[in-house]
Image (cartoon, rainbow, N blue to C red):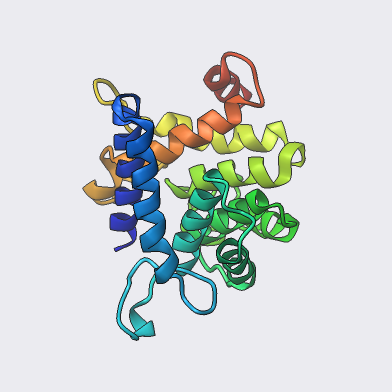
Amino acid sequence: MKWIVRSSVLLGLIGFGQSGLAATQAQIDQAWNKGLSWLMPNQHGDGGWSSVITSGNPTQQGLGIQTTAAVLDALNAMGFKSNYTYSAGVAWLSNAEAVSVDALSRQAAAIKNSGEDATAYGTRLASWRNERLAWGAYSGYEPGLPDTGLGVAALIDVQGTSYTNSDIFNALCQILPAQLAAPNNLWSYSVTAVTTAPASQTGGAIIPTVHAVLALGKANTRFTGGLAEMALRTH
C-alpha cells in the first residue's frame, strides 16, 4: 500500500506536468475544486488524513503522517493556509509520532512549509542518519532510496545552512553512484552494493528515481555547477 500511494501521487504530478500546458485555466480550476471537494470531507475529526478511507474502521487507516503531509503541501501550494482545515491538519501532524524516515522527513518538511517551528523534527531526522550520514528506512539503517533522498530534501528545507555542505556531500555520495547505467539512468531502492539484495531492490524504479532527482535539485540550489563531480571528488 505504501508504494501504491506514493506512485499514484507522483504519477499524478508527472501527468499534470506533461499535460498542464494544454489545459485551460477553467479546466485547472475545475480539477482543483473537485480535489478539494473530496479532501475536505475526508479529513478526520482529529485533523489528519490517512491513505485508506474506510467507514469507521480506524485499524485500516494507514500512513497518516505521509498522507497528511502531502495534503498540507497541496493546500499550501494552492494558497489555502489561512483556514481551519489547514490549521487542524498542521496541529495533528505536529503531534504525530513518526517511526520511519519516510514519515519523519515528510512531517518535518510539511511543518516547516506551514511556517511553524520545525527545528525539533530536523534535529531528530539528523540523528537518525547512519555512519555514512545518509538514511535507511529507520533510524541508523543502511542507506537506501527513497529515504536518503527524502532526508536530504527535508533537512535542506528545515535546517538551511545548518545542514552543512559536507553533510550534503556525504549523503549525495550514497545517491549518485546508485544511478544505473544508460539507457534508463534510473535509481534503485538499494544504494549499496549488497549482492544478497533481491532484484526488486537493485533494479531501476520510479519512486527512488523521483526522490533522488528531487534531492539533487534541492542540493543544486546550494551549489553552482559540477554538483555530481564535487560530491564524488570529496569522498
Residue that appears at 40% across and 70% down: 42
Figure quadrant of residue 133 = top right
Instruction: Count how many numbered circles sit on residues in the image.
Output: 0
Q: Quadrant of the N terminus?
A: bottom left
Q: Return the x and y of residue 23 as percentages of the image width and height.
A: 31, 30
Q: What residue is drawn where x is 28% and y is 40%?
A: 205
The residue sitting at the front extreme is 26
Residue toward you, 215 or 15: 15
Using residue 174 as the reference point, say whether residue 14 is left or right of it: left
Q: Residue at x 54, y 44 (%)?
A: 77
Q: Residue at x 64, y 16 (%)?
A: 224
- Find residue 55 and report its image quarter: bottom left
Residue 81: image x %, image y %? 61, 54
Q: Nearer the viewer, residue 39 or 171?
A: 39
Q: Position of residue 223 (x, y in %)?
A: 65, 21
Quadrant that contains the C terminus: top right
Q: Position of residue 56 (x, y in %)?
A: 34, 86
Task: Judge whether 56 appears above or below 192 on screen.
Answer: below
